[in-house]
């Protein structure tokens, strides 16, 4: 059996225009949204450690299961315009697709199902019987800086790929540079200067990806 070719996609501001945590905060009103959005931006730009804000944002918002489902549908309506065709072509060309995110599995699941991406590597949320927020998977690697390369190394050890590619917009994605064969910075929604400067390949549409995979 041939070794697989792996391609990891960040979700927020990459496969979809939104940042899921920001949209969950928006449901709490403009003040909460502004506060959470700034924290998210600072983390994605590398100004704040991810682990410093991860629990804090969820403790402030405490999203319900219904709100998670609502934002999950937004990922689909705000999907990157070429995402469906790109995913179909990648699959046809023999790539194994994985979503690797510091977002939440339950929020991302509808988009993954829509795109037919079977494997999500993201942070699980837990709810009580009434659908109220309880906690998150505090041990999952992407809750902290360095988590994405650590998780990729684990999956590489599991699947023994012939090639590994990562596509994403944030500093946590750029951190994978040393463990993948190709890191592709994405600026279709937010152009982060550190990511653009650090990435050998930088694209603004997922459709551009195929110019760099040959």
Image: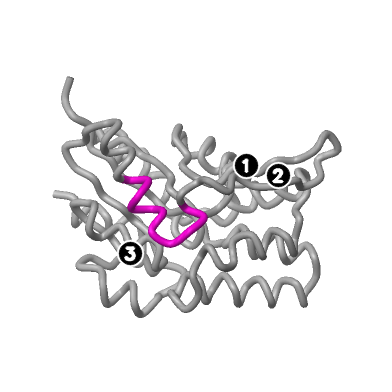
Residues marked 2 and 1 touching at CB (< 8 Å): yes
Earlier along the polypeptide chain: callout 2 or callout 1? 2
Q: Determine which residue is flagged by label 3.
A: 174
Q: Determine which residue is flagged by label 1.
A: 106
Earlier along the polypeptide chain: callout 3 or callout 2? 2
Q: At 80% across and 38% down in the image, what residue appears?
A: 128
Q: Which mark is residue 69?
A: 2
Earlier along the polypeptide chain: callout 1 or callout 3? 1
Q: Position of residue 105 (x, y in %)?
A: 57, 43
Q: Whole-Å distance between the Cαs marked 2 and 1?
A: 8 Å
Q: Which residues make up the magenta segment?
A: 142-152
Q: At 47% across and 70% down in the image, what residue appears?
A: 44
Task: Tell me the mark number nearer the camera, choosing from 2 and 1.
Answer: 1
Mark 3 crowdedness (10 Å alpha carbons): few <14, some 14-19, many ≥20: many
Q: Position of residue 53 (x, y in %)?
A: 59, 67
SS for callout 1: helix
Task: Tell me the mark number nearer the camera, choosing from 3 and 2.
Answer: 3
Q: Nearer the viewer, residue 9 or 208?
A: 9
Looking at the rendered image, the quarter that the N terminus falls into is top left
Q: Whole-Å distance between the Cαs marked 3 and 2?
A: 29 Å
SS for callout 3: helix
């Amino acid at each position: 059996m041939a070794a697989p070719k792996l391609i990891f996609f960040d979700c927020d501001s990459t496969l979809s225009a939104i940042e899921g945590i920001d949209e969950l905060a928006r449901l709490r009103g403009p003040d909460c949204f502004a506060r959470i959005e700034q924290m998210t931006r600072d983390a994605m730009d590398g100004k704040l450690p991810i682990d410093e804000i991860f629990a804090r944002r969820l403790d402030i918002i405490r999203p319900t299961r219904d709100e998670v489902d609502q934002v999950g549908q937004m990922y689909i309506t705000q999907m990157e315009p070429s995402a469906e065709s790109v995913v179909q072509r990648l699959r046809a060309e023999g790539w194994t697709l994985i979503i690797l995110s510091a977002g939440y599995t339950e929020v991302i699941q509808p988009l993954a199902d829509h795109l037919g991406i079977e494997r999500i590597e993201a942070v699980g949320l837990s709810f009580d019987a009434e659908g109220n927020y309880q906690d998150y998977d505090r041990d999952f690697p992407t809750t902290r800086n360095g988590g994405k390369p650590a998780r990729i190394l684990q999956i590489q050890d599991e699947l023994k790929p012939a090639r590994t590619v990562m596509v994403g917009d944030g500093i946590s994605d750029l951190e994978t540079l040393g463990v993948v064969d190709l890191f592709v910075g994405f600026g279709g929604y937010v152009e982060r200067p550190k990511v653009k400067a650090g990435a050998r390949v930088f694209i603004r549409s997922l459709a551009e990806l195929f110019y760099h995979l040959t």
